[in-house]
């Protein structure tokens, strides 16, 4: 648990503070593009990380994971604030990709390689083309209707350790409600889920959704 306070400050300066000021600096230029490209809205695409939403310690990288969680929230705040300027803000939160951080080094072409076996449902680590496809989607015409969203090119990593907290967070964000209450959830819901359909088969669940006006709606569901 040894941590250097300056290392924490440097990490947040790189992953959060600098992102805000760079986005703010480019905002006037982005707004001007509205005049030259009718029907297309300019956008900012932030690269966060799945570490910002997973409940683990990210192999002890507390400062890194915390900064990425902060960056995800900053993305939502900027998306809400920049609505007035008609600039969209979205985020890509990748899972494990070969990099100097995950592999330890890189070759003369600035490429890294991971020799270990990926444990996500996709059975592999991320490729350059996976990130490229997400960028092209969010920045191109196909992503014009996207704003304040997070895209997760992670090979299904969260499905391995889906927790009740993550499930509630997903419902909150997807349905735009203020609170989510889960009932009748099995005690092993927080454990690794290798075959979620089998784990939850024949078990019904009830979720109570509470919106910002304190209106409550209950949803019952069952995994097929």
Image (cartoon, rainbow, N blue to C red):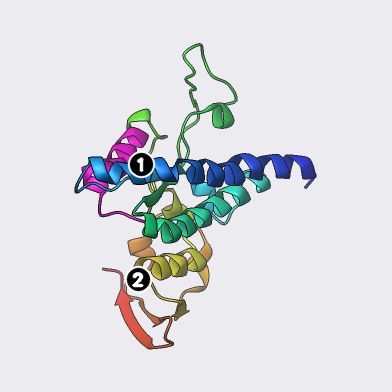
Q: Are marks 2 and 1 in contact (CB under 8 Å)?
A: no
Farthest residue in the left direction?
39
How far across and how far down the image is residue 76, in percent?
46, 58
Q: What label does residue 175 carry, if any?
A: 2
Asked if the magenta segment contains residue 101, the reply would be: no
Farthest residue in the bottom direction?
215
How far across and how far down the image is residue 107, in percent?
51, 14
Q: What element does badge 2 sit on? A: helix
Name the dominant secondary structure of the magenta segment: helix
Q: What element does badge 1 sit on? A: loop
Identity of the residue drawn at 40% across and 75% down? 177
User: How far separated are the C-alphas under marks 2 and 1?
Assistant: 27 Å
Relative depth, front residue between 11 and 88: 88
Q: Is residue 102 visible?
A: yes
Q: Is residue 58 visible?
A: no
Identity of the residue drawn at 43% across and 45% down? 27
Instruction: Find disc 1 in the rendering and name its residue.
Output: 122
How far across and how far down the image is residue 220, in percent?
32, 81
Residue 123 left/right relative to 188: left
Residue 34 left/right relative to 157: left
Q: Considering only vertical position in the picture, is 117 above or below 224? A: above
Relative depth, front residue between 174 and 141: 141
Q: What label does residue 19 carry, if any?
A: none
Relative depth, front residue between 159 and 87: 87
Q: Which residues are magenta?
A: 130-148
Quadrant housing the C terminus? bottom left
Task: Decide which of tag 2 and tag 1 comes sooner along the chain.
Answer: 1
User: Which mark is in front, 2 or 1?
Assistant: 2
């Amino acid at each position: 648990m040894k941590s250097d306070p300056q290392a924490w400050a440097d990490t947040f300066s790189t992953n959060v503070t600098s992102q805000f000021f760079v986005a703010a600096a480019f905002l006037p230029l982005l707004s001007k593009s509205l005049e030259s490209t009718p029907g297309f809205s300019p956008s900012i695409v932030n690269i966060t990380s799945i570490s910002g939403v997973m409940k683990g310690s990210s192999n002890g990288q507390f400062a890194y994971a915390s900064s990425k969680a902060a960056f995800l929230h900053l993305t939502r705040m900027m998306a809400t604030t920049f609505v007035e300027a008609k600039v969209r803000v979205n985020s890509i939160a990748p899972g494990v990709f070969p990099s100097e951080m995950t592999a330890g080094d890189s070759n003369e072409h600035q490429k890294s390689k991971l020799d270990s076996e990926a444990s996500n449902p996709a059975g592999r680590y991320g490729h350059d083309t996976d990130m490229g496809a997400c960028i092209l989607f969010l920045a191109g015409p196909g992503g014009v209707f996207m704003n304040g969203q997070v895209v997760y090119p992670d090979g299904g990593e969260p499905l391995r350790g889906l927790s009740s907290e993550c499930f509630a967070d997903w419902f909150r964000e997807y349905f735009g409600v203020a609170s989510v209450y889960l009932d009748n959830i099995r005690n092993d819901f927080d454990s690794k889920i290798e075959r979620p359909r089998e784990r939850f088969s024949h078990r019904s669940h009830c979720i109570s959704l509470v919106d910002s006006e304190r209106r409550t709606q209950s949803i019952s569901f069952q995994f097929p």
